[in-house]
Amino acid sequence: MQVNIEELKCPICMQIFENCTQTNCGHAFCAECILTSINHNKYCPICRSEIFSLYPSYNLRKIAEQAKNTHQELHPKENSQPPKFWDEKIKEFNQKNHRPNLGLAGIRYDYNILTRVMTQRCNSYSFAAWFVFLLVLAYLVWPYDLIPNTEGLFGFLDDFLILIWGIWALHKIVSYFEESQRNRPNRVNEIRQRMRELRERNQNNQNDRNNQNN
């Protein structure tokens, strides 16, 4: 899958993501960059929404590492701390700034994060392949030809081109599913991590309610 390097650059330092981290509003930054920015200003540098939750983006981290391995000119930041260090910093930030009883607002922010993750997983090539494949099927069952077969060799040319197009689309779809199967363990781990974060938030909310009642 081709990746645009510009889409993997942090909006703050303009370098490729290092320990990529997402905010509750759905934007991605280097962990060090966004944590440093929050110390001076608690609002998102892009949309100006208030930041009160951070999430390690393991999917983008993996893509960024693959890009670094592919493009030798992309070097990691100097004196960069390991991912575990920044994950602990993120956890500390979330514990310090978590909001109890968010209700619908919390659901909305969770929706922003989940929507962004799903968008990252959307493969434009796979979508195009499915579209072409379905278009080819529709053409094959359609009773009319672009060029009638009565036109001789040219009459079969459109059928041949459509058939080649359909084979290409089918190949892309199969390749996409094979890649999805290889990446399935990573997706499962990411979902589990997200669920752990949500459970921790719910537990913190429950503890706050208990403290208020006491």
Image (cartoon, helix red, strand yellow):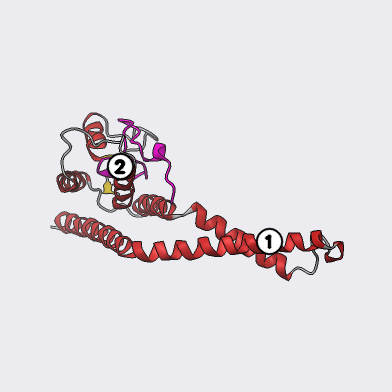
Identify the residue position indicated by label 2 in the image: 68
Q: Is mark 1 on a helix, strand or loop?
A: helix
Q: In this view, does 162 lie above or below 40?
A: below
Three-letter amino acid code at the position of disc 1 = Ile
Mark 2 Cα shell of 10 Å, populated few (<14), some (14-19), many (≥20): some
Choose top left, top right, bottom left or bottom right for residue 45: top left
Q: In this view, does 141 lie above or below 189?
A: below
Identify the residue position indicated by label 1 in the image: 162
Q: Is 19 inside the magenta-drawn segment? A: yes
In the image, taking residue 174 as reference, residue 213 lies left or right, namely left
Tag 2–tag 1 contact (CB < 8 Å):
no
Q: Name the residue: 30% across, 36% down.
A: 74
The part of the chain drawn in magenta is 1-29
Choose top left, top right, bottom left or bottom right for residue 34: top left
In the image, taking residue 171 as reference, residue 29 lies left or right, namely left
Q: Where does the image place residue 202, in percent across and percent down from the top left?
A: 24, 59
Q: Where does the image place residue 148, in percent across and percent down from the top left?
A: 84, 63
Name the one closer to the observer, 99 or 59: 59
Q: Which of marks 2 and 1 is nearer the N terminus?
A: 2
Q: Where does the image place residue 72, in percent across and percent down from the top left?
A: 30, 38
In the image, taking residue 138 as reference, residue 75 lies left or right, namely left
Three-letter amino acid code at the position of disc 2 = Lys
Q: Name the residue: 16% across, 59% down.
A: 210
